[in-house]
C-alpha cells in the first residue's frame, strides 16, 4: 500500500512517559492481551482466506459461463472478500511481518494500462514516471522490463508476482492483489466524479463472443491473480497460527512491546494512512483516482471496515464471517483499568468515528451518492460528510495517543502531507 513516508515530528507522534499507576486487580494481564490480539489476527486472516476462496470459485463460474449474472456474482464475491480483509489493516505499521507482505494483496493506486486495455483518451499514451504505463500484458506476450525482455506467453502467478508487481520499482505497477482483480472485474471507471462505476462487459471473458480482444489471456490473468491472492492470504493466515512467524515476532517483543505494537497499528492507520493518504488527499484534490476501490465504487465500505477492524483489535471482540464473535482479553479492558479517563475518551472517539463512517456508508449504500461523488468539486454536502470522517479519525488518533501516555508506552505514528502540510499537496 502506498503511504506517506513522513513521520510526525511533533510531540503527539512520540509519547514517552513514566510508568503509569499500578495495574488494577481485575485488569487482564498484558501478555494475555497481546496473545488474544494474535488470536484475533489469526481469525481475521482465516476469514480473509475463506472469502478469497469463495471469490476464486465465483471467478471460475464466471469463466465457465461468462454472462451478466456470473459477472455480477463474481463482483459481489469480490466485495464480500473485502469485508474481512479490510478489518486486518489495523495490524499494519506495528507488525513488520504484515507490512513487508501487504503490498502483494492491497497495493494501490494502479496504472491499469500495465494489465489490460484502457480508454486512451482519458488515460493517455505514456507516463514520464512509468515506462510500463501502457504495457498491456494481456495483449502482449513479450514485455520489455528494463534491459530484460520477459516472456508472458503463459500468464502465471509466479510471473505476476516476480516480474510484474512493482516492476522497475514503480509503485503504480500493481499487477497482483485485490485491486488488480477489481480492475479485471469492473474495468475502468470512466465517470470521473459523476455517477457510475466500471462497466466491463462479461463478454470480455467469452471465448465464443470475445469483446476487446485477447479474452483467452484475460481469463488466464484473472485466474492467475485470483490464485495468487488465495496463496498469499494462506501464507499470512498460517503466519498467525500458534507456531507462525508473525505471531512469534509479536510475542518476542514482550508484553510492553506487544501493547505498543497494537497501538502503533491503530494510530498509524487512523492518522497517516486512512485519514491522510486514503481520504484527505482525494478530498483536497477532488480526484477519484485517489479513491481506494476506484473501479467498483466500493471505497465507502473499505473505509468503514478499516474502522470496524480497528475497534475489534482494540476491544478484542471480532465478529467473524460465520456470524460468531471471537472474544477475549482486549486492550480496551486493560486501558480501562490502568488509564480509565484516557480509555473513556478513546471509547467515545471510536464511537464517534464509526457514527460518521456510517453516515458516509449509508449515503453510498442508498444509491444517493457514491464515494467518488462525495469527494468531487462543487459538492459541499458530500465534501462535509467526508471531512467529518477525517476530523473524527484525527481525534481518534489523539485519543489513542492519550492511552499510550496513560499506559506509559512510546509509539511512532505514521504521518501524511495531506494532514501535516496540505499546502504542499495542493501545489502538486
Image (cartoon, grey):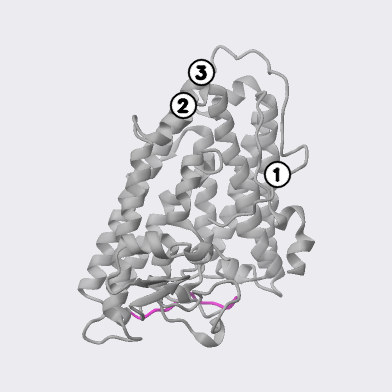
In front of the other: label 3 or label 2?
2
Q: Are marks 1 and 2 in contact (CB under 8 Å)?
A: no
58 up-or-down from 260: above or below: below
The answer to whether residue 216 is left or right of residue 101 is: left
Residue bearing mark 1: 395
Q: Is residue 127 left or right of residue 228?
A: right
| Above or below for 213 versus 412 | below
**Looking at the rendering, in which quadrant would you find the C terminus?**
bottom right
Q: Residue 29 shows which numbered tag?
A: 3
Kindly report the distance in space between the C-alpha atoms of the residues bearing marks 1 and 2: 30 Å
Q: From mark 3 to mark 2, how far is it between C-alphas?
A: 14 Å
Please give left or right for residue 140 compared with residue 262 in the image: left
Which secondary structure, mark 3?
loop
Q: Which mark is residue 251?
A: 2
Q: Residues within 10 Å of mark 1 (few under 14, many from 20)?
A: many
Task: Residue 333: give its label.
Answer: none
Q: Position of residue 303 (x, y in %)?
A: 54, 55
Q: Nearer the viewer, residue 357 or 56?
A: 56
Callout in the foreground (1, 2): 2
Query: Which residue is at a point 38% across and 59% down the rendered structure image?
Result: 161
Q: Residue 142, image x and y in percent?
A: 35, 77
Q: CA distance from mark 3 to mark 1?
A: 28 Å
Which region of the structure is painted magenta?
192-201
Q: In percent of the image, x 54 and y 40: which residue is there?
A: 311
Q: Is residue 41 visible from the viewing direction of this image?
A: yes
What is the secondary structure assignment of the residue under circle 2?
Answer: helix
Amino acid at each position: 500500500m502506498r503511504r506517506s513516508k513522513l513521520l510526525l515530528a511533533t510531540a503527539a507522534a512520540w509519547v514517552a512517559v513514566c510508568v503509569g499507576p499500578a495495574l488494577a486487580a481485575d485488569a487482564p494481564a498484558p501478555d494475555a492481551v497481546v496473545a488474544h490480539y494474535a488470536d484475533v489476527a489469526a481469525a481475521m486472516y482465516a476469514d480473509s482466506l475463506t472469502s478469497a476462496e469463495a471469490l476464486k470459485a465465483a471467478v471460475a463460474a464466471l469463466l465457465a459461463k461468462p454472462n451478466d449474472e456470473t459477472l455480477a456474482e463474481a463482483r459481489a464475491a469480490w466485495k464480500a472478500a473485502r469485508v474481512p480483509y479490510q478489518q486486518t489493516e489495523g495490524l499494519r505499521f506495528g507488525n513488520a511481518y504484515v507490512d513487508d507482505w501487504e503490498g502483494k494483496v492491497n497495493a494501490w493506486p494502479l496504472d491499469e494500462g500495465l494489465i489490460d486495455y484502457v480508454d486512451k483518451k482519458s488515460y493517455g499514451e505514456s507516463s514520464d514516471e512509468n515506462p510500463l504505463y501502457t504495457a498491456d500484458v494481456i495483449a502482449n506476450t513479450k514485455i520489455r522490463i528494463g534491459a530484460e525482455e520477459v516472456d508472458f506467453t503463459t500468464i502465471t502467478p509466479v510471473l505476476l508476482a516476480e516480474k510484474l508487481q512493482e516492476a522497475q520499482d514503480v509503485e503504480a505497477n500493481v499487477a497482483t492483489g485485490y485491486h488488480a482483480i477489481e480492475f479485471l472485474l469492473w474495468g475502468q471507471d470512466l465517470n470521473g466524479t459523476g455517477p457510475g462505476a466500471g462497466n466491463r462487459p462479461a463478454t470480455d471473458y467469452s471465448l465464443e463472443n470475445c469483446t476487446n480482444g485477447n479474452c483467452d489471456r484475460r481469463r488466464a490473468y484473472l485466474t492467475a491473480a485470483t490464485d495468487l491472492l488465495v496463496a498469499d492470504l494462506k501464507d499470512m493466515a498460517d503466519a498467525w497460527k500458534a507456531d507462525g512467524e508473525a505471531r512469534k515476532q509479536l510475542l518476542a517483543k514482550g508484553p510492553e512491546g506487544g501493547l505498543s505494537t497494537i497501538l502503533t497499528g491503530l494510530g498509524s492507520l487512523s492518522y497517516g494512512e486512512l485519514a491522510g493518504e486514503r481520504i484527505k488527499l482525494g478530498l483536497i484534490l477532488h480526484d477519484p483516482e485517489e479513491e481506494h476501490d476506484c473501479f467498483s465504487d466500493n471505497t465507502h465500505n473499505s473505509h468503514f471496515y478499516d474502522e470496524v477492524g480497528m475497534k475489534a483489535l482494540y476491544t478484542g471482540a471480532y465478529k467473524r464471517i460465520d456470524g460468531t464473535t471471537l472474544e477475549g482479553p482486549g486492550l480496551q479492558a486493560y486501558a480501562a483499568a490502568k488509564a480509565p479517563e484516557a480509555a473513556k475518551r478513546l471509547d467515545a472517539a471510536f464511537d464517534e468515528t464509526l457514527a460518521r463512517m456510517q453516515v458516509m456508508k449509508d449515503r453510498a449504500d442508498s444509491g444517493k451518492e457514491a464515494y467518488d461523488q462525495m469527494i468531487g468539486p462543487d459538492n459541499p454536502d458530500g465534501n462535509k460528510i467526508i471531512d467529518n470522517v477525517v476530523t473524527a479519525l484525527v481525534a481518534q488518533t489523539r485519543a489513542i495517543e492519550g492511552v499510550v501516555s496513560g499506559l506509559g508506552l512510546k509509539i511512532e505514528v505514521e504521518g501524511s502531507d495531506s494532514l501535516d502540510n496540505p499546502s504542499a499537496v495542493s501545489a502538486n
